[in-house]
Image (tube, coloured by chain):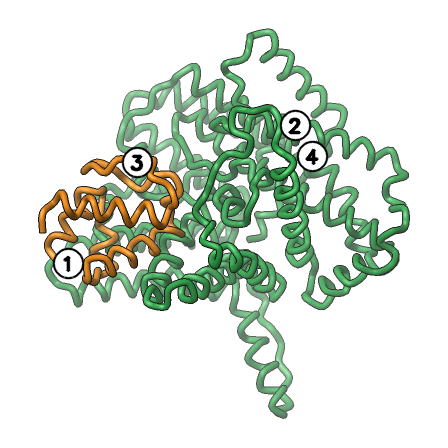
Chain colours: A orange, B green
Amino acid sequence: MEIDTIKERVGEVLASILEHNNFEIHDELTAKDVDGWDSLSHMMIITKIEEEFGIRFKLRELNKLKNMGSLVSLIQTKA
Amino acid sequence: MVFNSFDFVGFIIPVLLLYWLVFRKSGVYQNILLLVASLFFYAWADWRFLALLIASTGINYYLGLKIYQSEDDDRKRNIFLYIGLVFNVGLLLYFKYFNFFYEGFFDLLNIFGADLSYSTLQILLPLGISFFTFQTLGYLIDVYNEEIEPSKDILEFSVFVTFFPKILSGPIERAASFIPQTQIKRTLTYEVFVDGLRQILWGLFAKVVIAENCAAIANPIFNTYEDQSGSTLLLGTFFYAIQLYADFSGYSNMAIGVSKLFGIQLMRNFSTPFFSTNIADFWRKWHISLTTWMMDYVFTPLSFTLRRHQKRGLMIAIVATFVLVGFWHGANWTFVVYGLLHGIYFIPLVYSGKMNTSEIVAKGKWFPSIKEIIKIGLLFFLIMLTDVFFRAPSVTEAFAYLIKIFSSSIIDFPSVLTGTATLTTLILTAFFIIIEWINREKKHDFEISNYHVLLRWSSYIFIFLLLIFFGRSAETFIYFQF
């Protein structure tokens, strides 16, 4: 799948869970930079991403994620 | 040796002078001094468990390296992690929870008709054990998850575990932010040093003026709750809620301030939690180092496992996590109920999906809106009720206390309000809350570095005078027992 398509769809997931779109998807983006993206909302975002792309993550893969770039590449390897 | 004692002043001044004048040549020298000072500090508090602290440091250091070195062998990695989990959790279970489960086991058998008598063991609780074992547990899990590399220098690692400003009551530090600070030579910066002193002053005020005066009112009420009116009991919980906050946030501010004097930044532990409008926001601001720890190492794996169950899974994960947060405080059902209630408070938020909105109340404005005031007041009231469980010696007594609050005597004039001591404490508390309100967007509760020099100095003098006139001596902190 195209990187840009993945980014766009991840952006939509974020906006739907967090109920705002005050963020710009780029590789260095981290949860800390996005209002409301904390440990409580994180798992809802992850679950929605899994549904959106029809994939399943492992907890260890998630723990290693550093930023949006690594999340997008992880999705790309699975989707 | 509590921060608000002359013993501590006598300890910290020579250590600071040595640190910045004699041991300043390199980070290694600084670490040697910090380690010696920390072990001395811990031994002064309770020398009997010094060996345990040293052993725990050594074992966790070794296990961290072993997990890392077994990179290519998953089985070995898992074994070393499990040894670490069993060791650290085992320490906690033995020293803190053994009697709780032991009694529970026999009580359960007796319910089913066994007629067994038992006597509990006399187990002393090593000071700070809940705090330092959580730090080392987090460290091992981080190494296992390859989020950090293990420390390869036992001196640095020992400073991480034993650093005296945080050893007795946290903040529960993370290796990822603490250890790098021990790897460089720390330099003395005027701004950081002064900011540390300021934070210590505010912490001291919160502890010896606010917490101790509130305690002087709340303690007799809780101790004689059977003879008090509902209205007095309600005020008792109000003063206890303020006491608990001022006690622990005061301690935390002092710990963070003292640490700054050594050029080391600890994590923020409180961020004006009572100005929250919902329970999730409250826990983002209350005992932050514990909550984030629980979120990362308990809630995340649990909610990951339960994620297919959508909101129901999330709800179960939250309630379970908060029961554990409660239980962390001590081996008593009261803390379990405390955690359970907080977990239950989350349920409406989970279902409405409004859990993730976190913002500073009335950002950039002087006053909150009416709607915000109502939300803040309601949340404070709900938290006050849970604090009865936090304070009461048993669940039965907590319920008796709460039932008495909501009796017809809730409309009586509260007798406690007649004393001048209560009015003085109310005024001091109002002052405390106003200053916290003004600084709610700042890095800490008394960050006034941008104020005019005259205003700054008059604030210091004013608080200093309050300390002299209204301060009470305090031998201990509530969180030392955990």
Q: Type of residue at label 4?
A: Ile
Q: What is the CA distance from the residue labelled 2 to the residue labelled 1?
A: 54 Å
Q: Residue at x 31, y 47 (%)?
A: A14
Residue B212 at what x, y percent from top left?
71, 38
Residue under label 1, please give it.
B70
Q: Residue at x 68, y 49 (%)?
A: B381
Residue under label 3, please give it.
A23
Q: Residue at x 21, y 60 (%)?
A: A57
Q: What is the CA distance from the residue labelled 2 to the residue labelled 4?
A: 13 Å
Residue B466 at what x, y percent from top left?
72, 23
Disc 2: host chain: B
Quarter of image, res B254: top right
Residue under label 2, please give it.
B434
Residue under label 4, please give it.
B210
Q: What is the CA distance from the residue labelled 1 to the residue labelled 3?
A: 40 Å
Q: Type of residue at label 2?
A: Ile
Q: Is residue B126 visible?
A: yes
Q: Type of residue at label 3?
A: Phe
